[in-house]
Image (tube, rainbow, N blue to C red):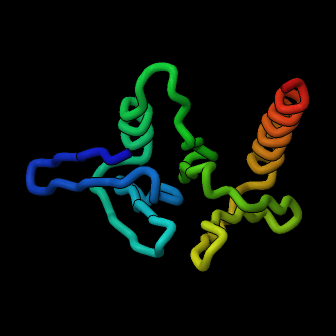
Amino acid sequence: MKICINFRDELHILDLDKVACFQAEGNYTNVLYISGQKQTLSIGISKMEQVIKQAYPKGVRSPFVRLGRSVIINQAYLMSINLPKQRLTLADYARHGYTLTVPKQLLKNYKEVIKTLYQKDEKNSNRT
């Protein structure tokens, strides 16, 4: 899925399927692609979060989730969560990846959400 972000002097095309995460940097947002490329947008992360939500049609769940004030991750690339080290790893299981430092409480809460989600999926698949 691609989106177009148009500013007065700039136009950016983002391929959301290839975005690993968005990171806040003051009034700017860094777009980190799983391939290692980086784009900086002159838009705050809250506004970026709204743009992402609007990009997906009703009934289609976005793979993006905001973790705290400064990062939005693409859950499609979630590889691991390490609570003691406060690390979250996003990877494409090939050769690209990012390790992010996230506050422990946010990671703990997110870990529970993911664990519950996968447990539901396992129960549903056992019924078929």
**Image-quadrant location for residue 89:** bottom right
Residue visible at 55% across and 30% down in the picture = 61
Q: Count the marks.
A: 0
Check the image and name the residue furthest to the bottom.
95
Left or right of residue 26: residue 104: right
Q: Decide if residue 57 is in sight here.
A: yes
| Quadrant of the snapshot with the N terminus | top left
Closer to us: 8 or 61? 61
Residue visible at 57% across and 51% down in the picture = 73
Q: Position of residue 66 (x, y in %)?
A: 58, 43
**Image-quadrant location for residue 51:** top left
Check the image and name the residue furthest to the left.
9
Q: Where is residue 46 in the image (x, y as percent from the top left)?
A: 43, 40
Closer to us: 53 or 126? 126
Q: Position of residue 42 (x, y in %)?
A: 27, 55
Q: Decide if residue 23 is in sight here.
A: no
Query: Relative to 6, does residue 116 appear above or below in the rendering?
Result: above
Check the image and name the residue furthest to the top.
58
Q: Where is residue 58 in the image (x, y as percent from the top left)?
A: 45, 20
| Quadrant of the snapshot with the C terminus | top right
Left or right of residue 97: residue 119: right
Left or right of residue 80: residue 122: right
Residue visible at 63% across and 46% down in the picture = 67
Residue visible at 55% across and 43% down in the picture = 64
Left or right of residue 101: residue 84: right
Closer to us: 78 or 112? 78
Query: Relative to 50, does residue 29 appear above or below in the rendering?
Result: below
